[in-house]
């Protein structure tokens, strides 16, 4: 008894095309910057104060000076920046 192999046409079912892409900043959305304090209070608890979200990086980076006037022992800070990006094909696929 032979196994029956279902017949099926062999052909192109999908067409793929390699496309080059450009990736860069999204001009329609703003970058967001936040600076935060990594210092500790006298009892060892983390400060966790932050500048709040700023579109202007320089404004966010000035915040540690304001925070240090109230807490001169806090000398360690971090900065988080969010940069929205977009990917666009160099040539639109046809």
Image (tube, rainbow, N blue to C red):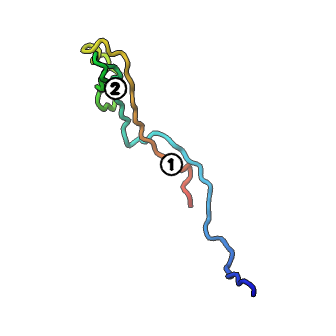
Residue at the disc numbered 2 = 36
- The quarter in which the N terminus is drawn is bottom right
Residue at the disc numbered 1 = 88
Residue 29 horizontal side relative to residue 69, left or right? right
Q: Residue at x 62, y 70 (%)?
A: 13
Residue 37 horizontal side relative to residue 84, left or right? left
- Which is nearer the eye, 25 or 48? 48
Q: Residue at x 67, y 82 (%)?
A: 6
Q: Using the image, determine if residue 3 lies above or below residue 93.
A: below
- Which is nearer the eye, 14 or 50? 50
Instruction: Confirm or deny contact between disc 2 and disc 1 (CB under 8 A).
Output: no
- Which is nearer the eye, 54 or 45? 45
Task: Specify the quadrant of the image occupied by residue 49.
Answer: top left
Residue 38 horizontal side relative to residue 90, left or right? left
Alpha-carbon distance for marks 2 and 1? 34 Å
Q: Position of residue 94 (x, y in %)?
A: 56, 61
């Amino acid at each position: 008894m032979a196994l029956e192999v279902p017949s099926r046409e062999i052909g192109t079912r999908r067409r793929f095309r390699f496309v080059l892409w450009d990736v860069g900043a999204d001009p329609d959305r703003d970058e967001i910057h936040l600076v935060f304090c990594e210092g500790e209070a006298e009892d060892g608890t983390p400060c966790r104060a932050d500048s709040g979200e700023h579109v202007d990086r320089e404004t966010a980076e000035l915040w540690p000076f304001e925070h240090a006037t109230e807490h001169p022992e806090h000398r360690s800070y971090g900065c988080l920046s969010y940069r929205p990006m977009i990917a666009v094909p160099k040539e639109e696929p046809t």
